Image (tube, helix red, strand yellow):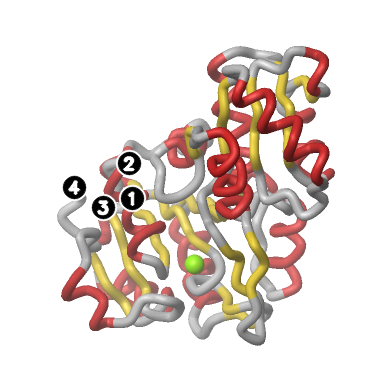
């Protein structure tokens, strides 16, 4: 583990609740990213949302004044594509995912096939275009023994105004109710998404920090992957949550703005 923040050479950054809240940039976030750029430190934005591709996040960040290259955004969807390509190049996938996720898989050389084309894997993503026949086909394949992977485990995706969209975890629950099987999951809090990020990072693990606002996903993932962990209190977690968590972060700040100040002092 790094002894102090000044040993960190690379930051993995959660987005919602860490860099922005909904469509508003959090105070200090722009200064934080500028500082990383100025110091030549690496950073990659990580998201569990597999319904949109990295281009959508590059654009969203740009509208808020934050510059990110396409390789500086990693979704659980792309991490899943990288994971599958590592196991077997050109593997055949029956995908429950959006057109954006399908394009991402194809770009990584995976073959997207139908139920009749003997897929090697069923992959469940945050499929906002899902229909009953696809769910049924997925259940048949999984029951027949096809390997089964999911991009991320989130049950609901919170929206602004207090509404929720049923997320990939809800689709996983549907399939489990029918087949009794659960998938290997790539996204946070699992270490596989970090493994995918490491294919683009120069720094060794002990010089990488995961920064996020959720203990049970961001901090848990950092711990699972052997990274340094930084909790920011600008999103979901409150200071009192620290008393009862099994996922204790190495550092805690009110926001990435406060983290930037600490880096400046260090
Ligand atoms: Mg978050």
The residues bearing labels 4 and 2 have C-alpha atoms spaced at a distance of 12 Å
User: Which residue in the protein does label 3 denote?
Assistant: 7
| Position above or below: 183 against 23 | above
Upstream in the sequence, badge 3 or badge 4? 4
The disc label shown at residue 3, or none? none
Indicate the secondary structure of the residue bearing disc 1: helix
| Position above or below: 186 against 19 | above
For image coordinates 81% across by 22% down, the residue present is 113
Indicate the secondary structure of the residue bearing disc 4: loop
The residues bearing labels 3 and 2 have C-alpha atoms spaced at a distance of 18 Å
At which x and y percent is residue 226?
Answer: 27, 42
Upstream in the sequence, badge 3 or badge 2? 3
User: Which residue in the protein does label 4 denote?
Assistant: 1
For image coordinates 65% across by 16% down, the residue present is 120
At which x and y percent is residue 9?
Answer: 36, 49
Indicate the secondary structure of the residue bearing disc 3: helix
Is the residue marked by circle 3 packed among few (<14), some (14-19), or many (20+) residues within 10 Å? Answer: some
The residues bearing labels 2 and 1 have C-alpha atoms spaced at a distance of 5 Å
At which x and y percent is residue 20?
Answer: 57, 75
Image quarter in which the C terminus is found: bottom left
The answer to whether one can see residue 147 in this image is yes
The residues bearing labels 4 and 1 have C-alpha atoms spaced at a distance of 12 Å
User: Which residue in the protein does label 2 denote?
Assistant: 225
Q: Are marks 2 and 1 in contact (CB under 8 Å)?
A: yes
Upstream in the sequence, badge 4 or badge 2? 4
Is the residue marked by circle 4 packed among few (<14), some (14-19), or many (20+) residues within 10 Å? Answer: some
Indicate the secondary structure of the residue bearing disc 2: loop
User: Which residue in the protein does label 1 denote?
Assistant: 222
């Amino acid at each position: 583990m790094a002894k102090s923040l000044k040993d960190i050479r690379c930051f993995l950054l959660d987005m919602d609740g860490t860099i922005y809240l909904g469509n508003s940039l959090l105070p200090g976030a722009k200064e934080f990213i500028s500082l990383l750029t100025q110091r030549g430190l690496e950073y990659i934005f990580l998201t569990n949302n597999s319904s949109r591709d990295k281009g959508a996040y590059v654009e969203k960040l740009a509208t808020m004044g934050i510059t990110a290259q396409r390789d500086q955004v990693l979704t659980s969807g792309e991490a899943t594509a990288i994971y599958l390509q590592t196991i077997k190049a050109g593997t055949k996938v029956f995908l429950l995912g959006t057109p954006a996720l399908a394009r991402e898989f194809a770009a990584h050389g995976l073959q997207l096939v139908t139920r009749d084309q003997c897929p090697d894997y069923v992959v469940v993503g945050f499929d906002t275009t899902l229909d009953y026949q696809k769910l049924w086909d997925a259940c048949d394949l999984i029951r027949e023994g096809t390997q089964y992977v999911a991009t991320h485990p989130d049950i609901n995706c919170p929206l602004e105004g207090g509404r929720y969209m049923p997320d990939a975890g809800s689709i996983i629950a549907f399939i489990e109710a029918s087949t009794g099987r659960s998938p290997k999951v790539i996204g946070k809090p699992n270490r596989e998404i970090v493994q995918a990020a490491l294919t683009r990072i120069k720094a060794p693990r002990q010089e990488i920090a995961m920064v996020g606002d959720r203990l049970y996903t961001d901090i848990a993932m950092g711990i699972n992957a052997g990274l340094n962990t930084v909790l920011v209190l600008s999103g979901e977690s409150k200071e009192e949550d620290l008393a009862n968590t099994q996922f204790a972060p190495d550092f805690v700040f009110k926001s990435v703005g406060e983290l930037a100040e600490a880096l400046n002092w260090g």
